[in-house]
Image: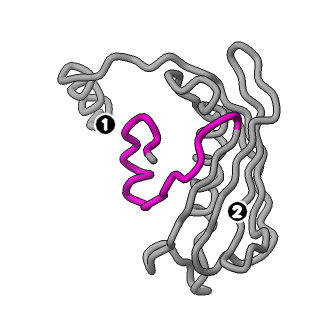
Amino acid sequence: MNFGVAIPFVAHLGFELTLFEGGRSELVFEPRPEHLNSFAVTHGGALMTLLDVAMAVAARSVQKEMGAVTIEMKTSFMQPARGRLIARGHLLHRTATMAFTEATVFDADDKACAHATGTFKFVRRLPTGPRSAQALQTIATD
């Protein structure tokens, strides 16, 4: 299953989308050595990205042609995340322009490791192409 759009950072991390419908999402993440911290468990930044994507995908699952950008996110880390991880996202409420969501990451033993709530703004996707890529390159080098 794909995300409906190219998300280079998510592809780089190797997240696999397994559920994307009805206000729900599920992603699988097999952390590699470069995703670990000095305690040999999944780095909090990787977990926050996984939670962020799970929530955004849950929001987008009810209107797949729209984008969803993070407005705010609160994360709680409950225990170290080891092994294969599964993130489950849920759309709690939506308005015409906003989505209120939550997600939890579970470890290989199905124990909750981290939980987040987030608010997302629905946005229309802008046209992409050579001109857009050139504009992004200009912004990146300024």
- Residue drawn at (71%, 78%) of the image: 80
Location of mark 2 (residue): 105
Look at label 2 and name its amino acid.
Val
Residue lying at the far bottom of the rendered structure? 39
Left or right of 116? Residue 3 is left
Picture coordinates of residue 89 (x, y %)? Answer: 70, 47
Q: Which residues are magenta?
A: 2-23
Question: Which of the 4 quarters of the picture holds residue 96?
Answer: top right
Q: Nearer the viewer's eye, disc 2 or disc 1?
A: 2
Mark 1 Cα within 10 Å, few/some/many (few <14, many 20+)?
Answer: few
Point out the image quarter for the C terminus: top left
Q: Secondary structure at mark 1?
A: helix
- Residue drawn at (60%, 31%) of the image: 60
Picture coordinates of residue 26 (x, y %)? Answer: 62, 52
Q: Earlier in the sequence, mark 2 or mark 1?
A: 2
Q: Is residue 14 magenta?
A: yes
| Rendered view: 95 above or below 92 | above
Res. 37 mark? none
Left or right of 1? Residue 103 is right
Location of mark 1 (residue): 140
| Rendered view: 46 above or below 137 | below
| Rendered view: 138 above or below 15 | above
